Image: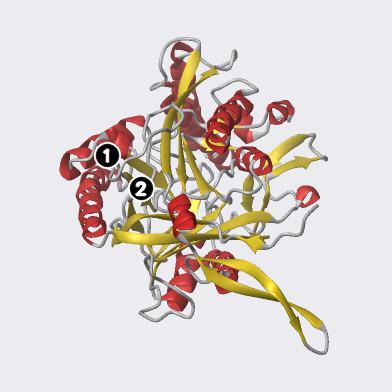
Amino acid sequence: MPSTAIVQSPSSRCEFGIAWTDITPPVGMYHRMWGAASHDRSTGIHRPLRTTVVVMRPIVGRVANVPGQPATGTLETCPTQTVLVSLDHCLLRAPEMEALLSETCRLTGLSRSELLVTFSHTHSAGYLSRDRADFPGGELIGPYLDSLPAKIAEAFRAAQANSQPATLTYGSTTCEMGCQRDYLDEERGHYVCGFNPDEAEPLPLNVVRVTTDVGQAARLPFTGEPPVLRATIVNYPCHTTTLAWENTLISPDYVGALREVVERETNAPCLFLLAPCGDIGPRDGYVGDTLVADRNGRQVGFAALSVLAGMNPAETDHVYVGPVYSGATLGNWRHQSWDATRRASTSLAKRAALTVQLPYLASLPKLAEAEPLHRELIAAEQAAHAAGRLDEVAILRAKVERQRRLLDRIRPLPQGETYPCPAWAWQWGDAFWIAVEGEPYHFLQSELMRRFPRRPLIAITLGNGTNCSYLPTREAYSKTQLYQPEVALTAPGSLESLTDAIGQQLAEWSS
């Protein structure tokens, strides 16, 4: 095997803009995300919440945009853009998600094909369902939801205004803050959703450094202004569930401290993108102590900074230039600026929109069965409360919440035998980006990384909603009483089929 003489810095070049704005809900709004929680209203703010908007557009170079088809063609300019919106919330149910997408498109002039909304997935921001209006603090939900599209539009206009040619440089490491969470409780003979030390492995942490484009004439050493750091993107697969039922504060969970650490060092915005983590959670989680959330966030933030510190200068590759004869014969490596061919390759832009038909679970309950059971559980909870059986009340309260959320999941499902699951794929220069609806297990990311080891992979979950719910691995369905398969809507093998469909698209682009 010949010796490697060039180590490329994985990179993309595109038009890039970013902006964020505060979306912290009012204190006292309905907050109860956890079935085990005894409170309904939030009582304060741990850290503020954000919406961050990123605008990405292809620039001069080979460009293609044929949804679901291999990319072809050469264009000088391309009007197509991807507008990525990240919200510091857990998720939105189907009616609220549809309203948000529609109103955001109306206010911004964007088409649905240009807009992708995702979530940091914090479980401590509040439960944003309009049908909770009759609950304590529920009267604040509607006005708050109504305010979100205008705030997204505000950030979008700011991101558009600061959009300019940029270079995205990719790096990665591992971080042990998160861990596999399908844990076997051997004493009771069933699985629980919690830290599993028996499958503790470091998880991939991907970092994207966004700098101003230094231009075709750039050389090392730089004769003009060096590139300016414009943003950092951190992509990590771990549920934002440090804070749980004991917490009564509005919080972005570990993401808040993560951003603080990175932004303090870089003086530029930090965007967190949640990678596939249906079976991943914090090693230290399900607590009420915000100091634990901050500690978890700092761990991920410092790991991200270590990647930034080790990155090559923007728009350079590491090249072997020959021996230097000294006391020893030394191998001389230098960072060399890109030539025109290398720059053009990093400007390549492709996009595909996919729909993958996933079969429903054969055991999926029907509305006609689920609604009466919900009413029965409510009556049982009320009876236990009247009789003073408080331990029973706590259990029934959680069961009522589970059944209510089951109804939320199955009501919006399309009729038929399969669910049309949306997914998206992009090639930006050397890197692949993907996004999927719902909450897939980490297998989606790990398997695609295995198939495309030479490509940076930025993987995004909860894309434009969560109608398909969890997507566990085939093997996970056999784990007794495990939460994720219990709330899944599609049949075993669905995640593997989705992974194959995305993988086939990426393989076409790689050939």
Residue position for label 1: 100
Q: Residue at x 41, y 28 (%)?
A: 408
Identified by mark 2, the residue type is: Leu
Secondary structure of the residue carrying numbered label 1:
helix
**For the C terminus, which image quadrant?**
top right
Residue position for label 2: 84
Q: Earlier in the sequence, mark 1 or mark 2?
A: 2
How far apart in space, not on screen, are marks 1 and 2 (Cα)? 14 Å
x, y (%) of residue 83? 32, 46
Identified by mark 1, the residue type is: Leu
Q: Residue at x 36, y 80 (%)?
A: 224
Residue 296 position (above or below residue 53): below
Secondary structure of the residue carrying numbered label 2:
strand
Which mark is nearer the camera, 1 or 2? 2
The image quarter in which residue 128 lies = top left
Q: How is the image coloured?
A: secondary structure
Residue 77 position (above or below residue 70): below
Pick the front one: 262 or 247 = 262
* Residue 305 visible in the picture: no
**Left or right: 177, with 325 as reference point:** left
